[in-house]
Amino acid sequence: MKRFAKWMIYFLCVCLFAVLFVACGEEGALEGSLPSIGDISVESSAVISSVETSSTSEESNSSDESLPEASSEPEESSEPEEPLPEDLSTLEYTDMKGVCNDSFSSDGTTVKTAVVGSKTVLAFDSGKNCYYVVLPQTADHYSIAAWYGRYAVYAITADGSKPVTWYECSVTYETPLNQAVLTFLDGYKNPRLFCSHTDGSDNYLAVFDRETGAMRLFKMDDSGRELKNEVDIQTPPAVEGKEPTAMYFFGKQTGVMAFRSEEETGLSQLLYYTADGGKNWLPAEIDAPEGTIPGDYEVVDLIRSNGENPVYTLTVKNGEKASRFVSADLLSWREMPEIFEGVELKGGVGDAGMLYAVIGEEMVIHLPDWGKTMRFPKDNAFGYGMAGDVAFVATKSRGNLESCTVYKLVKGQEEPVATELAIHPGNDFVSAGIDFQTVDTKVAFLIVTGLDEYWENEGFLAIYRTTDGGETWEAMQGEDPPYWDGHEELVMWKFFDENIGIRTHDCHINNDLEYRTMATFDGGKSWQSLSELPYGPDVSFDAGCSYVIDWGYTNGVYWMVAGFNGDSMKGVEDEIFVSADLLNWERVEELPLPEPPADGGKT
């Protein structure tokens, strides 16, 4: 009995071995030695899955239940990642696909891309140097805003399959400094983004939804990442249903929208201007330059110059021909004079009737309608004014506050007439600025400010006025300029007529306007501080301050726009105030804008 039991155990072992042999033989797994546990990697199941679910693979005898579920995401481990070359300049770069506002920087920096596997290399080319930043993804569209050496790059997938991703980049680093998904854009299936950055560090992001046609304007934080507010943008009625090719906003209210213009419309439907945040639009007046052909026109770029009197430079492409236009108000555009070809304008006045730029070692001032050009040393300080057939240029050397020279040029006159004005005897201060304003053809103001050597203790203000078109000038501050204490540089000033004016210094702290924002009613001889502004409930001066962005006089009402800086002011909207007497102010929701002119803003 014991012998029989032993033989039965032996027989069963042989049968089990035979079954295992047959099973393994059919799978072809016994070619060589059996794998050990350490030889089996986690990725092997994904590889088997991809092979067995391929349309070209042979059917397997294994049960489907034993296979891992296929992922809707691409299998990153199925193929090795293509490595980046050590020298990124060796890649083949192309113009950025689908970029919005591609000449995003006034210094002429352009950007190109190269795709390597799942990464995108951005090449920032300033013309002198080229820097590279590697993004960990590819995209169908990009939009870029630039400020203070940083770039906000928005990567967009056309079909909305991936969220819009924000990257904060710097040309000094090869990888993004920060990145985040912009969840507030999740509702946009196929968005097109347009970025704008203003001098006051405000960023605006306009979004057009290709699927619904809806447009919205977002005010962003100073990194271009976090949302501050959102408003709807209306489409100009004449181009209803068309997709904008560019949008530029230079503040909460002021902006332009561009469309591709067709042969039958020419330049009449190329560019539109808004002064109320996109609620209403006026068509811009652009005269076609000589040599252009009937057909499509497209806005390639729009840049605003820095400084006291900014002008806007518009580049329009017609076929292979690119033309540049210039404007002081975004409504009336004139062709760029040849003297400034390839030069960045510094500014302009008089509806761009006077333009100026540094060319070589000179400040070149050009009056295109008059065919006149004046040249000065570029290191001088300048103020400019123009009214009707009279143009003024005030200039002085930066290290001299004892005097300045005002040049008056009348249309048709060969040479300007120079008048020397005494400013500050003793020359105890360094200059902080010189500026000029024409009220009309007879009234103009010249203002010169100075701060002490260290820009921190005290300063002075010299004001001169003419009421006879520049024949004579009166010192409005008496024998000596008025002084003010503290580091409070003059920021903005404006005269509404020969007597009434307003000026502001530095930021408003704790809503204290004394010696910071003042009004005059005698041409600048004396000044009165404004009353406290009635800010909204969200304004907190715990760790912040307010500052004047803009002001004006419309339909018998003075108005002022105030912005905010500081940690306690994050998320606070710009506020608008109106006044009947320039001293007492009321908070309102909208600017008192004039009615659009009957001729569409062409006069």
Image (cartoon, rainbow, N blue to C red):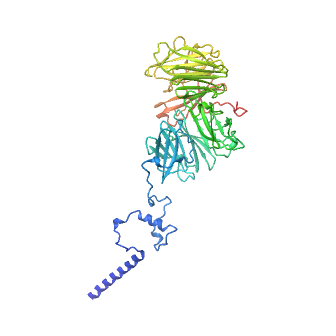
Q: How many marks?
A: 0
Locate residue 395, reporting x and y percent: 55, 20
State the residue in front, 180 or 408: 408
| Residue 115 horizontal side relative to residue 579, left or right | left
Note whether 203 is above or below 70 in the view shown. above
181 and 480: which one is in front?
Answer: 480
Q: In the rendered image, which quarter is residue 258 located in?
A: top right
Indicate whether 380 appears above or below 324: above
Res. 17 in view:
yes
Q: Which quadrant is home to the N terminus?
A: bottom left
Left or right of residue 568: residue 549? right
> Which residue is the extreme one toward the top?
479
Residue 188 in the image: state x and y as whole percent.
58, 49
| Res 560 visible | no
Residue 582 image offset from top left, x and y in percent: 60, 22
**Residue at horizontal 35 percent and vertical 73 percent from the top:** 32
Q: Name which residue lies at 63% across and 49% down.
A: 212
Q: Position of residue 71 (x, y in %)?
A: 48, 61
Location of residue 347 by image quarter: top right
* Along the line of sight, the residue nearer the viewer: 547 or 291: 291
Q: Quadrant of the C terminus?
A: top right
Nearer to me, 106 or 510: 106
